[in-house]
Structures are given as C-alpha cells and as structure tokens.
Image (cartoon, helix red, strand yellow):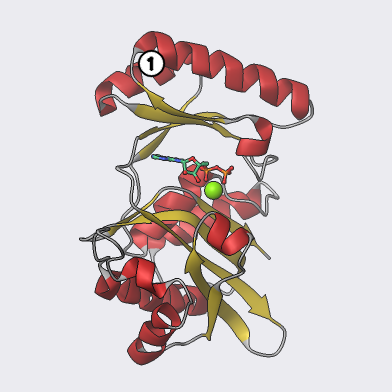
C-alpha cells in the first residue's frame, strides 16, 4: 500500500468523485512504477504560460475537470505548443469550448505537460469481472483497438508468463517486433508494466476501472501519455 496513492484516492472520495483527474491518475501510476509525462495543474492562463516555460517547449495542455471524461470530445487537448502566445491562445480555446459544451462542469484548470516523443501507441486497461475480479486488457492503440478489436485479456493476478502471452497473442504483434523498418519495441518493459498493474489492481480494490490510453512504447521503455482511473 502506497501512502501517496491512498491519499489521492481518499481525497477524491472525500469530494464525492468517482473520476480521478488525469493529473491524479498519472501521479498514481508514477507511484505504481510506470513512466508518465510530467504533468502539472495550471489554474489560469498566466500560470499555464509560466509552467510551459519552466517545463520547456513544446508542451501539451488539456482540460482538467472531474466532469469531463473524454477530453478530445470537449475540444480540450492542444498539442505541440511552441510559444507563450500559442499556450495562451490554446488556453482560451479550451476554456471557451468547455464552457460551451459542458456548461455545468467543474473546471480545475488545465494540465500542462511535455510533448512526448512519438512511439507505438499501446493501450492497457482494467475492468472488473463479477466472477474473476480485476481483468487486464492489452492492445495496440488507435484504429487497431477501435476497428480491429485486437486485444488480449489477463485475469489478475498474472504471472510473468501470462504477461508475455498477453503481448504476443495480439494479431498486431509484428508491429511490436520491428515491422518494415520500425524499431523493435521494448516488450520486456511492457511485460513488467503488466505485472505492476496486476499488483496494483489487486492492492486497491476501491478502483473500479482504469485505462492508460495511449502509452507510447519505444525501443527502450515507454511513456504514459493519458491515464484515467474510476473508483467504485
Ligand atoms: P482523451 O481524453 O481524449 O483520451 P488524450 O489525453 O488521450 O485525451 O489526448 C488525445 C491524444 O493526444 C492522445 O491519444 C495522443 O495521441 C495525444 N497526446 C496527448 N498527450 C500527449 C503528450 N503529452 N505528448 C504527445 N501526444 C499527446
Ligand atoms: Mg486518451
């Protein structure tokens, strides 16, 4: 049991929230041993600009609201911002469309984060089965998951061997294995993440579901770019 994780969960519960913000969820997964984009909350435009300069351009800013689950749908994600002026304009646009599309949403501000170097998009999720408890899902991101439904499942707790099987059994595995000149992905790292997430799901029964969508996977390591956690 990790103290920071417990505190984040308790805080959300205390505020009667079931959705953790992206910032909270990333903090949780960082504590659980995954690599996440450094992400900070800015409560106004000036704050967002100061933080962007501190983090170094290019940056990404995203809406932070416990009432908005899909940020892109709210026009709440702006990528690859390179100057204070771009950050300011993106902040104004995000706030204007959030107010228009979700007039009742409680808005905490925006999440400022570094622009992650692109990699192979992976998704890992967890849902609870009435009979089997936490079940992990692994798949490729983007159209592969949405159109092909090319995913694999593992009932927790999983073994190292299960983790390896989850990764190798998807149809798109050749894409992880160096396909037409794309780099070979660090599969051992993804296996270790599945094992950590299996432990994590077992340790915190108050978590109902989570998804890491996307993770950018590289020849060495990987980076969580977006994370969502829903409590019971
Ligand atoms: P949503 O809530 O709509 O899922 P995401 O945070 O996943 O929003 O952002 C949408 C897309 O923007 C991601 O799928 C990813 O391709 C890209 N993206 C988000 N954050 C970053 C980042 N820090 N660096 C690079 N690309 C990002
Ligand atoms: Mg996402």
Looking at the image, residue 112 sits to the left or right of residue 127; the answer is left
Looking at the image, residue 29 sits to the left or right of residue 151; the answer is left
Q: Residues within 10 Å of mark 1 (few under 14, many from 20)?
A: many
Residue 165 image offset from top left, x and y in percent: 41, 87
* Residue 27 vs residue 125, the one in the foreground: 125
Residue, far left: 220
Residue, far front: 180
Give the answer, above or below, for where 156 lies relative to 228. below
Q: Can residue 145 be seen in this view?
A: yes
**Residue at 59% of width from left, 17% of height from top?**
93
**Residue at 33% of width from left, 87% of height from top?**
160
The quadrant of the rendering that contains the C terminus is bottom right
Residue, far top: 85
Residue 183 image offset from top left, x and y in percent: 24, 60
Q: Does the residue labelled 1 lie within 8 Å of ligand 1?
A: no
Residue 69 image offset from top left, x and y in percent: 66, 45
Q: Is residue 4 visible?
A: no
Residue 33 occupies quadrant: bottom left
* Residue 55 vs residue 207, the one in the foreground: 55
Residue 218 occupies quadrant: bottom left
| Dot 1: element | helix
Residue, far right: 104
**Residue at 33% of width from left, 61% of height from top?**
34
**Residue at 72% of width from left, 84% of height from top?**
130
Give the answer, above or below, for where 55 lies relative to 158. above
Looking at the image, residue 174 sits to the left or right of residue 45; the answer is left
The quadrant of the rendering that contains the N terminus is bottom left
Q: Mark 1 points at which residue?
A: 49
């Amino acid at each position: 049991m990790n103290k920071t994780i417990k505190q984040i969960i308790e805080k959300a519960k205390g505020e009667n929230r079931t959705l953790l913000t992206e910032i909270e969820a990333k903090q949780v997964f960082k504590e659980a041993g995954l690599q996440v984009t450094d992400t900070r909350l800015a409560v106004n435009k000036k704050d967002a600009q100061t933080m962007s300069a501190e983090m170094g351009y290019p940056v990404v800013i995203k809406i932070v609201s416990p009432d908005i689950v899909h940020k892109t749908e709210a026009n709440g994600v702006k990528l690859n911002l390179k100057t204070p002026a771009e950050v300011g304009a993106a902040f104004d646009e995000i706030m204007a469309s959030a107010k228009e599309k979700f007039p009742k949403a409680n808005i905490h501000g925006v999440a400022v984060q570094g622009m992650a170097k692109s990699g192979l998009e992976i998704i890992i999720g967890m849902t609870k089965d009435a009979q089997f408890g936490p079940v992990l899902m692994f798949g490729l991101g983007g159209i592969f998951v949405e159109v092909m439904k090319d995913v694999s499942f593992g009932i927790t707790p999983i073994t190292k061997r299960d983790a390896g099987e989850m990764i190798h059994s998807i149809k798109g595995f050749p894409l992880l294995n160096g396909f037409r000149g794309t780099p070979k992905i660090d599969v051992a790292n993804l296996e270790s993440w599945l094992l950590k997430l299996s432990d994590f799901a077992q340790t915190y029964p108050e978590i109902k579901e989570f998804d890491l969508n996307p993770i950018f996977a590289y020849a060495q390591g990987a980076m969580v770019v977006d994370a969502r956690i829903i409590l019971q």
